[in-house]
């Protein structure tokens, strides 16, 4: 009986002590995006920039899934700081990305912040 009680107490504590530190999102499917209210105010201009520029070619769902899972949804490759930098360079080289170095740097910093926040 004591073991059952102890096991129940441990499971309850484990369940309630785990905090979900993931970055909050809104919407589903093609309408999925990060919740602007859950992001630090200093990163909101970068969020607006990323949403405006990146959604020209793909939905924000792709970015949200990559941040949440740590994997690029199309290739399945790891989505970490190194991959974020590589994607930034790739977007800089794309002629139709309509992004300059400063904008890409802002988005890379934002994505690194989101990745870090999601891992807490």
Image (cartoon, helix red, strand yellow):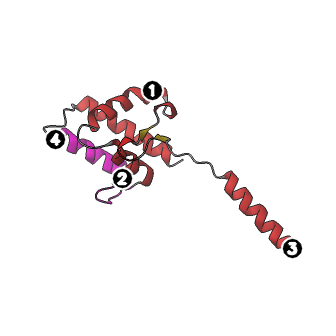
Q: Quadrant of residue 34?
A: top left
Spatial separation of the CA atoms under disc 3 and disc 2: 47 Å
Callout 4: few (<14), some (14-19), or many (20+) C-alpha neighbours within 10 Å?
few
Q: Quadrant of residue 91?
A: top left
Depth check, mark 3 against mark 4: the one in front is 3
Which of the two labelled residues, at mark 2 and mark 4, occupies the earlier sequence position? 2
Which disc is residue 93 wearing? 4
What residue is pinned by disc 3?
A: 1
What residue is pinned by disc 2?
A: 79
Spatial separation of the CA atoms under disc 1 and disc 4: 27 Å
Q: Secondary structure at mark 1?
A: helix
Q: Residue at x 32, y 46 (%)?
A: 84
Callout 2: few (<14), some (14-19), or many (20+) C-alpha neighbours within 10 Å?
many
Residue 95 placed where, x, y %?
A: 13, 38
Depth check, mark 3 against mark 2: the one in front is 3
Callout 3: few (<14), some (14-19), or many (20+) C-alpha neighbours within 10 Å?
few
Residues in magenta?
A: 71-94
**Rendered position, 50 above or below 115:** above
């Amino acid at each position: 009986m004591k073991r059952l009680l102890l096991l129940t107490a441990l499971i309850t504590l484990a369940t309630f002590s785990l905090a979900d530190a993931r970055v909050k999102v809104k919407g589903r499917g093609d309408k999925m995006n990060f919740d602007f209210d859950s992001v630090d105010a200093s990163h909101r201009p970068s969020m607006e920039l990323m949403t405006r520029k990146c959604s020209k070619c793909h939905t924000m769902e792709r970015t949200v899934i990559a941040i949440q899972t740590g994997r690029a949804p199309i290739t399945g490759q790891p989505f970490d700081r190194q991959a974020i930098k590589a994607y930034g360079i790739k977007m800089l080289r794309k002629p139709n990305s309509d992004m300059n170095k400063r904008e890409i740097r802002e988005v890379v910093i934002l994505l690194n912040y989101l990745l870090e926040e999601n891992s807490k």
